[in-house]
Amino acid sequence: MNSSSGNFSNIKILATLIFVIAVSLLVDSCVHEPFIDPFALNNGEPTTPGCVSNGLVCFESSILPIFNSSCAIPGCHNSKSHKEGYTLDNYNNIIRKGISPGNSSNSKLYKVLFETGESQMPPGAPLSKAQKDSIAAWINQVQKNTVNCNCSCDTTAFTYTAIIQPIIANQCVGCHKPSSLGGNIDLSTYSLVKAQVSNGKLIGSITHAVGYSPMPQGSKLSDCQITQIKNWISAGAANN
């Protein structure tokens, strides 16, 4: 009996050690991929409505379009493909993992933007420095879900370099570049954008007109941005 009791005690001790080690491994495996409850941010509110005038990056107009255009596309990180477990099509999904709140340099979703070769994200063409800087600033500001904050939009400002090209780069180029020709359309250069202006497809798509593919997919440019593009086209769509 004493021998049996001793063996049973040893088994219990061994089982306890195995359990402790297993739990430790599970905890360690989650350190770099934290799950963030979106409602734990913004003082319990899911959104922070109103205009942003204190220097914060606007998620709705500056960050979400980058993810939608360059990441949440078929075969990558949309709701159907969710490659490597990432779905990057809305605020709640974007913040769930790969982001260390307030620390862009320790956030996988930011660091991967600087990879090269097969690990490069987005594949085919990197984001611009301005886009990377915007994402970094948003993460460092504890990635709030700021909406309705495109207050500085001015319909009388519509030069290609300062206004139109950045809109197209953030909202369209991710799906319409040499490595990802959605609809067999490339919008990565001025001349290619001008071609879509000339055939009427650009304005038809962004206004969601009948007979055209509505763009961007799953969303729509603001009324001000559409007016800016219309004004640019009416003025001759110059490369200014």
Image: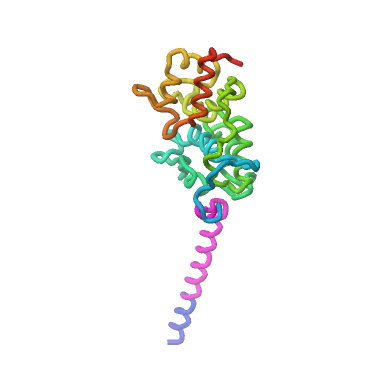
Name the residue at 55% across, 38% down: 63
Q: Is residue 111 visible?
A: no
Against 139, residue 197 (above or below) is: above
Q: Residue furthest left?
A: 211
Q: Position of residue 6 (x, y in %)?
A: 48, 82
Residue beneath the point at 58% across and 25% down: 163
Residue 180: % across, % down:
46, 26
Q: Quadrant of the N terminus?
A: bottom left
In this picture, which residue range is highlighted in magenta? Answer: 12-41
Magenta stretch mostly in which secondary structure?
A: helix
Q: Position of residue 202 (x, y in %)?
A: 45, 20
Residue 165: quarter of image: top right
Q: Residue furthest bottom?
A: 1
- Asked if residue 144 lies in the magenta stretch, the reply is no
Residue 50 visible in rendering: yes
Q: Nearer the viewer, residue 83 or 208?
A: 208
